[in-house]
Image (tube, rainbow, N blue to C red):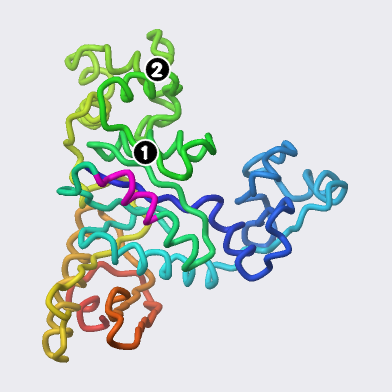
Amino acid sequence: MYGLVDCNNFYCSCERVFNPALRDVPVVVLSNNDGCVIARSNEAKALGIGMGVPYYQARNLLEANKVAVFSSNYALYGDMSRRVMMMLADFSPELTQYSIDEAFIDLSGLGNELYDYGRKIVKSIGRGTGIPVTMGIAPTKTLAKVAGHYGKRYKGYGGVCMIDTDEKRTKALMGLPIGEVWGIGRRNKARLESAGVRTAWDFTRLSESWVRQLLTVTGVRTWQELRGTSCIDIDELPQKKSICTSRSFADGGLCELGKVEEAVANFAAACSRKLKQQHSCCATLTVFAYTSRFRTDMPHYPINRTVQFAVATNDQQEIVSTA
């Protein structure tokens, strides 16, 4: 089973962490140079403020409803993202950060404790960082995305939605528009709708050969994942904007500098390989480490350092030596 942890309205939530008076106030965050709206709180969404709308067009509506407006602060958002990911790494040794506010974790071996463990994660991150998160749990990454979609939309799930039976999978897919499926872009949405496919469930009823002909092997993978077969490698997720390689170490962690350096070098090399596999480069590198939050016999001590590359790179030697 996989879990997708997604921070709710992340940029707006970050602003609220440092100004609790904004908790029930509509909030929006603007892009560079205050060009357009790039993040909205639920209250702002309810006012009809659209995503990506130019600021000058929405200004009167924002002022009339006393919406708190912020210029984007990516240094703050990056730091809050690292805090969330550091806490999340405590709960699973296998963590892959998908974007600044999303990460997949491997939940194999938890059995009947999955839902309670998910609630524990959601509550712990909320208390520890002030950032509300939603968790979708399912046997595939794409279904975990589907579960997260419902977890965000309906408060009754308490922040955790789990698809662990075929009945739940069928019900979830029947209510999900095809355009909401992870990996189905606007062009493929139009193709599928022209063929009479309206929901994710309709999509799963198509034949594999038909899907392959229309959407190639990438579409077949999405089709298989929605049917419950995990076939997207967690290290080969499409269009990743961030890459994180981290592990939790048993038996007291790593206590010698040489072993810590070796681990950091191996993880940095893994990140370099992932960058090359998706034909991308990175402009920023962060190394973080911390003592176990579960050890009560010693003080908790975290460290992290971020470095900006002069030129974006995926060169293994440069990334490892910098790390």
Q: Which residue is mark 1?
A: 145
In the image, residue 11 lies at what x, y percent?
Answer: 57, 58
Residue 314, above or below 211:
below
Mark 1 or mark 2, earlier in chain: 1
Judged from this view, the residue extending furthest toward the top is 196
Q: Quadrant of the C terminus?
A: bottom left
Q: Which residue is mark 2?
A: 174
Q: Report the magenta residues as a range.
A: 113-121
Residue 252 is at least partly visible in this image: yes
In the image, residue 278 lies at what x, y percent?
Answer: 25, 52
Callout 2 amino acid: Met
Please identify the dominant SS of the magenta region.
helix
Q: Tell me the crowding category of disc 2: few under 14, some 14 to 19, or many 20 or more residues within 10 angstroms, Cα based.
A: some
Name which residue lies at 88% across and 47% down.
64
Q: Tell me the crowding category of disc 1: few under 14, some 14 to 19, or many 20 or more residues within 10 angstroms, Cα based.
A: many
Residue 216 is at least partly visible in this image: no
Between 94 and 321, which is closer to the camera in this rendering? Answer: 94
How far is disc 1 from disc 2 in space, using C-alphas? 15 Å
Name which residue lies at 29% across and 88% down.
298
Name which residue lies at 31% across and 51% down.
117
Name which residue lies at 16% across and 36% down.
231
* Left or right position of 225 against 8: left
Numbered tag placed on residue 186 in the rendering: none
Q: For the image shown, how many numbered marks are present on the structure? A: 2
